[in-house]
Image (cartoon, rainbow, N blue to C red):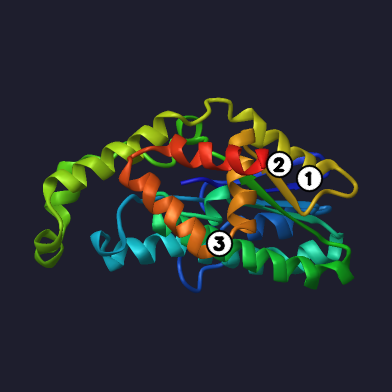
Amino acid sequence: MGTAGYSWVGITYTCPRPCVQKKEKSHCYPLCLTRNPGFWGLVNNAGISAFGETGWLSMEKYEKNADVNLLGSIRTILAFLSLLRKYKGCIVFMSSIIAYFSLGNDIYSMTKAAIEKFCDALRLEMKKFGVWVCIIQPGNYARSTKIQPPDSAEEIWIELRDEEKADYNREYVQEQANFFNSILGEGSTNGNEFVDAMVDALMYPAPKAHYMVAKLEERALVFVCALLPTVVMDSLFFLCSEQQSWYCLVTQARWFFKL
């Protein structure tokens, strides 16, 4: 899990966890009230992930991921919103390009898509108060963030409900786990790139609404997803999933931009 951070007068404080419990006020908030001569930045960086097709995952995993990735960020914002409006601060959210598509981590994709829409609404609402709202959209940085450890097909199979085991087999689960683990292994190890984007969002007088920190082919894939009809993208994703190849999608994106 990541952290929620806040800053004032050149000093940065880090909360080891966001407001992830229901009806909980951030434990960092009292410190702000007693020691805070100004409040100019809040970074929501908490995040967890889980691999598996829709029926493979328990309701508890759905709730935990939504509580941390989405509701935890919202609770943190609500706790500090009055200070941010008062000091015309900047709010930074950590999203992901996976908000535009899913490659085996449906829960993570779902929560990141939701946080993007929340940010879009919040950004417009905060304009009248002079508060900036920015979204960081990293590509594949799994190797640097360790947000998603490699998955064991055997553990996934053991946790499957009987009705799921009746519709799937061990070989399919193993193939999907291998595919997903291969994507994780291709992640960048240079986490400084998205940290630099956070710093720019906090320090620049007029930060961008979106910072996409990703490889060229990952950017191309995002734009292709936005431009092509859903039926076309569904066919491409299904084809590449069947071929167990992330580079199949990358190739399709490159081909599109050569037209």
Quadrant of residue 219 within the rendered picture: top right
Residue type, label 3: Ala
Coordinates of residue 70 in the picture (x, y in percent)? 52, 63
Q: Nearer the viewer, residue 15 or 188?
A: 188
Q: Relative to residue 36, is residue 27 drawn left or right?
A: left
The residue depicted at 52 percent of the width and 66 percent of the height is 71
Disc 3, SS = helix
Please give the label number shown on residue 202: 1
User: Which residue, given by chain and number where applicable, does mark 2 sit on?
Assistant: 198
Locate residue 61, reporting x and y percent: 32, 61
Give the distance between the C-alpha atoms of the residues marked 2 and 1, in whole angstroms. 6 Å
Q: Is residue 164 left or right of residue 233?
A: left
Hey, which quadrant is residue 209 in on the image?
bottom right
Tag shown at residue 90: none
- Under mark 1, the amino acid is Leu
Residue drawn 80% across and 52% down? 40
Q: CA distance from mark 1 to mark 3?
A: 22 Å
Q: Nearer the viewer, mark 1 or mark 3?
A: 3
**Image quarter in which the C terminus is found:** top right
Q: Which residue is mark 3?
A: 113
